[in-house]
Image (cartoon, rainbow, N blue to C red):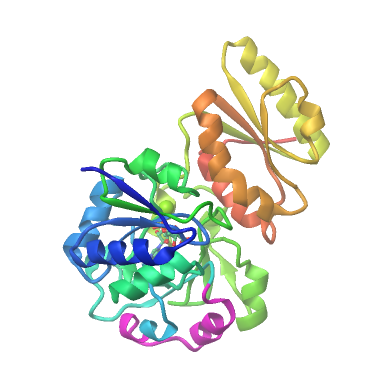
């Protein structure tokens, strides 16, 4: 299959119309959102949703998010709209927040992986909105990477993973946030299953207490059931081995510099995921500056793209950990998974 790429930066109409045709014919379309690129299909067509899982090599019990263009669409997808959901939708939609509630009968099992809940989100991206609107159906879309790999934050990443596997990629440039949406379950006590740009503090300011699932920052223990099926799989992992070093900026950077030297002595090619604050510790070493430690959202915005870039050159990626608080939680959640939870505290 030839994969066509249509730019939507200056004119989203053409791409959205072409994409909607493909979606309605049961095909797959990769499209930009404000978080990462999604791989979309008609969310009400079981065969089309199955095709997403085949293209990604994704386990079928890992549920997908339904993307909508208007808040009112939740009424047909959820059995009942929780009161907290209306408040959150009014505050944060369109935007990087996914909400989970009991599903209605029209949602196919293929979307939910057999769960009785369904995740819904209204993305804040013009191309995504137009595509969903033109298709006139909710669009089921996981991130548009091969399963287990870092999520794509530009069309080039999607092409790298999906070339020849899907008919169309809508190229809307680089994604604003660079990490996936916050996933909040409202099926019981409000619980964050995946942290993102909308933080626990921001959610709590609107609906009161919000929990964070334990698996957000630690690996599942043996026999433990994942609140979110996606959390039991290896995730965001480049081919290179990733090691996280946490501590004060100075201590972490010194440890990383030391590890770098000993790994290079063993013949391994290393790269460092550095920050503005620590780059001077890495002179004469290979590093990429992700952003500013004091603004974790800058680290999030470049994390996946940097992992993909460093992965092309290195056998081992050494990355600084930051406190997993506020916006830092999303960063550490992705980084620790990319590292398979290999972390050194100094
Ligand atoms: O920003 C995003 O959310 C991107 C863009 C494309 O919208 N999408 C995305 O989808 O990251 P995906 O499939 O890669 O991640 C969805 C996560 C998975 O961890 C999945 O297990 C969880 O949400 N999830 C989806 N439906 C769920 C449900 N009903 N119950 C629990 N977890 C669910
Ligand atoms: Mg994903």
- x then y, percent, for residue 194: 51, 60
- x then y, percent, for residue 33: 47, 61
Q: Report whether 155 appears left or right of 209.
A: left
Q: In front: 71, or 18?
A: 18
Give the prevailing secondary structure in the magenta stretch: helix
The quarter holding residue 112 reads bottom left
What residue range appears in magenta? 75-94
Q: In front: 159, or 317?
A: 159
Q: In front: 298, or 258?
A: 298
- x then y, percent, for residue 80: 37, 87
Name the quadrant of the N terminus. Answer: top left
Residue under the point 52% across and 41% down: 338
Q: Please determine whether, in this image, residue 25 is positioned above or below residue 322.
A: below
- x then y, percent, for residue 253: 76, 32
Q: Report whether 117 appears left or right of 216.
A: left
Label count reads 0
The quarter holding residue 309 reads top right
Q: Please determine whether, in this image, residue 294 is positioned above or below residue 191.
A: above
Q: In front: 5, or 320?
A: 5
Residue under the point 74% across and 28% down: 255
Q: Please determine whether, in this image, residue 271 is positioned above or below residue 320.
A: above
Name the quadrant of the C terminus. Answer: top right
Residue under the point 58% across and 57% down: 177
Q: Report whether 221 appears left or right of 104.
A: right
The quarter holding residue 127 reads bottom left
Do we see residue 336 in this rendering? no
Q: Does the magenta stretch include residue 245?
A: no
Q: Report whether 229 appears left or right of 25.
A: right
Do we see residue 274 in this rendering? yes
Q: Please determine whether, in this image, residue 179 is positioned above or below residue 109.
A: above
């Amino acid at each position: 299959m030839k994969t066509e790429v249509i730019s939507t930066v200056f004119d989203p109409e053409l791409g959205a119309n072409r994409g909607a045709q493909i979606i309605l014919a049961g095909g797959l379309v990769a499209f930009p959102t404000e978080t990462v690129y999604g791989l979309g299909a008609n969310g009400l067509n079981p065969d089309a949703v199955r095709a997403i899982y085949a293209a990604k090599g994704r386990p079928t019990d890992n549920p997908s998010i339904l993307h909508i263009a208007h808040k009112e669409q939740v009424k047909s997808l959820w059995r009942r709209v929780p009161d907290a959901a209306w408040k959150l939708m009014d505050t944060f939609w369109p935007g990087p927040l996914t909400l989970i509630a009991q599903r209605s009968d029209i949602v196919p099992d293929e979307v939910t992986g057999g769960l009785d809940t369904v995740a819904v989100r209204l993305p804040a991206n013009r191309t995504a909105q137009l595509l969903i609107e033109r298709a006139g159906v909710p669009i089921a879309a996981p991130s548009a990477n091969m399963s287990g790999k870092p999520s794509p934050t530009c069309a080039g990443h999607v092409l790298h993973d999906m070339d020849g596997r899907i008919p169309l990629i809508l190229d809307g440039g680089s994604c604003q946030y660079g990490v996936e949406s916050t996933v909040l379950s409202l099926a019981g006590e409000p619980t964050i299953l995946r942290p993102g740009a909308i933080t626990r503090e921001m959610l709590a300011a609107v609906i009161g207490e919000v929990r964070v699932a334990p698996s957000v920052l630690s690996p599942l223990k043996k026999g433990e059931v994942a609140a979110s099926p996606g959390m039991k799989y290896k995730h965001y992992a480049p081919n290179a081995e990733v090691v996280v070093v946490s501590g004060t900026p100075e201590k972490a950077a010194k440890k990383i510099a030391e590890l770098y030297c000993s790994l290079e002595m063993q013949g391994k090619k290393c790269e460092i995921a550095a920050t503005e604050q620590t780059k001077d510790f890495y002179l004469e070493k290979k590093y990429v500056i992700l952003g500013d430690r004091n603004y974790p959202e800058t680290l999030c915005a470049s994390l996946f793209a940097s992992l993909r870039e460093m992965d092309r050159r290195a056998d081992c990626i050494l990355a600084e950990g930051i406190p997993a608080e506020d916006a830092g939680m999303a960063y550490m959640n992705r980084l620790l998974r990319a590292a398979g939870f290999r972390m050194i505290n100094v």
